[in-house]
Image: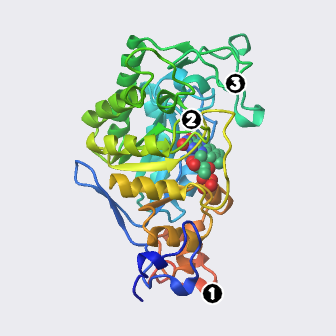
């Protein structure tokens, strides 16, 4: 079957019917993430999106992470992204967030990750390095997720400007140039630690209203120095952080962005596209396109694949490897997005919690194969016997 002409391509984000799918599924075609060290090949285009677990202790990974990562590494996905990981202690969103800022947090992460990787087929791992900015010192979601004040055991957050996320909250402290230099170094140090423990790829968290996104967005950044005001100025610090990490890490390095704040007159797709083009010029290998999170005023048009058009736009303009994410739940939907040229990779979060073997089912639906641990080879239903390829099991 040949691909249809551009004008007849499926509408954006619309699942394509199985009859219109290419015979060889793109979702299950390997993809090479470029990088200065020669690139990283993923067995398929399914990426496990970063998902905070809020169960670290003092930033250190725990048994929960061992169980969680082991399960996800056995999902059949092409790459696992470790949750938003604080590059400083006060850059965590909550007391329970994972960190990578000192030897103890590095040792704990190494221990749990190495053990999880021993219990699964080889799957590349990416880590999302993050600083929460004015959203730091929050309660975990199941305790309401609101700002934890100093007198409640929280800490004073740092941010581009002394502007709180919500009107009734105490403002964060506006960062000095020294604070910014320190933070840039913290990102670099965390990247070095990640590399040391064998993590293959790094995603900088520039989305969802956290620190790097706060610098980009005029809602959170009202600085009057060279780091605020014009789009050029607002992009300056995130680009400096990116460039510094690029110097220190030669594996695939990308950034997650919020393509729009969903607020009129704020950070939008045009600025995100320009930012992506500049990131590429600084050596960025991939961009992961999400949206929102900077303001409670946001009005998000949520629906299946609602962020995919942003990914498609940024991909075409920047020529960068692009990950689409957000309410992608069906194999045919994911396949249709790739076939329409709107992304190179598909990230899933909630669908993989709900169905931890989602990639197995997707492979069955698209007549493709995934790699699984031999212990699970007998676990396929009769109608999906070929999902693991030509594996053979015997008994007597
Ligand atoms: C439990 C949970 C934790 C999340 N933690 C993070 C995170 O650490 N970093 C991040 O960028 N996004 C985080 N997200 C957002 C997801 O990565 C993803 O962008 C979002 O859920 C939309 O994708 P989905 O529709 O496939 O769930 C989280 C989402 C969930 C459900």
User: Is residue 311 left or right of 202 when viewed as pictured?
Assistant: right
Dot 1, crowdedness within 10 Å: few (<14), some or many (≥20)? few
Q: Residue 186 at what x, y percent from top left?
A: 39, 24
Disc number placed over residue 309 in the picture, else none = none
The colour scheme used to paint the residues is rainbow
Foreground: 310 or 251? Answer: 310
* Residue matched to label 1: 382
> Does ligand 1 reach within 8 Å of label 1's beta carbon?
no
* Residue matched to label 2: 265
Quarter of image, res 321: bottom left
Q: Is residue 159 visible?
A: yes
Q: Residue 97 at what x, y percent from top left?
A: 59, 32
Q: Residue 175 at what x, y percent from top left?
A: 47, 14
Q: Is residue 65 visible?
A: no
User: Is residue 109 left or right of 278 when viewed as pictured?
Assistant: right
Dot 2, crowdedness within 10 Å: few (<14), some or many (≥20)? few
The N terminus lies in quadrant: bottom left
Name, please, the residue furthest toward the right: 143
Residues at circles 3 and 2 in contact by the CB criterion of under 8 Å: no
Q: Residue at x 62, y 87 (%)?
A: 383
Is 348 placed above or below 158 here? below
User: Is residue 237 left or right of 64 when viewed as pictured?
Assistant: left
């Amino acid at each position: 079957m040949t691909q249809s002409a551009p004008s007849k391509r499926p509408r954006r984000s619309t699942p394509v019917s199985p009859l219109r799918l290419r015979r060889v599924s793109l979702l299950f075609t390997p993809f090479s993430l470029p990088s200065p060290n020669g690139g990283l090949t993923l067995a398929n285009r399914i990426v496990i999106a970063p998902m905070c677990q809020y169960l670290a202790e003092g930033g250190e990974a725990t048994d929960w992470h061992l169980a969680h990562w082991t399960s996800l590494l056995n999902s059949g996905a092409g790459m696992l992204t470790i949750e938003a990981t604080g590059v400083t202690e006060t850059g965590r969103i909550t007391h329970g967030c994972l960190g990578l800022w000192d030897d103890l947090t590095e040792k704990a992460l190494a221990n749990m990750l190495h053990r999880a990787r021993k219990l699964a087929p080889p799957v590349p791992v990416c880590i999302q390095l993050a600083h929460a900015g004015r959203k730091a010192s929050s309660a975990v979601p199941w305790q309401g997720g609101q700002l934890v004040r100093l007198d409640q055991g929280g800490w004073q957050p740092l941010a581009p400007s002394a502007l709180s996320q919500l009107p009734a909250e105490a403002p964060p402290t506006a960062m000095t140039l020294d604070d910014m230099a320190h933070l840039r170094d913290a990102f670099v140090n965390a990247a070095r630690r990640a590399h040391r423990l064998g993590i293959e790829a790094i995603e900088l968290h520039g989305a969802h209203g956290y620190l790097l996104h706060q610098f980009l967005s005029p809602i959170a950044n009202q600085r009057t120095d060279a780091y605020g005001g014009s789009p050029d100025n607002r992009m300056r610090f995130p680009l400096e952080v990116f460039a510094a990490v690029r110097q220190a890490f030669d594996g695939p390095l990308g950034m997650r962005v919020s393509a729009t704040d969903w607020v009129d007159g704020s950070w939008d797709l045009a600025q995100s596209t320009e930012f992506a083009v500049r990131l590429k010029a600084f050596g960025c290998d991939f961009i992961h396109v999400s949206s929102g999170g900077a303001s409670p005023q946001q009005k998000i048009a949520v629906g299946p694949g609602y962020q995919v058009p942003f990914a498609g736009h940024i991909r075409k303009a920047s020529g960068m490897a692009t990950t689409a994410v957000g309410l992608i739940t069906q194999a045919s939907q994911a396949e249709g997005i790739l076939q329409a040229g709107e992304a190179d990779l598909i990230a899933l979060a909630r669908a993989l919690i709900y169905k931890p073997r989602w990639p197995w089912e997707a492979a069955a639906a698209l007549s493709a194969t995934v790699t699984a641990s031999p212990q699970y080879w007998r676990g396929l239903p009769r109608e999906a016997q070929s999902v693991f390829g030509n594996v053979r099991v015997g008994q007597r």
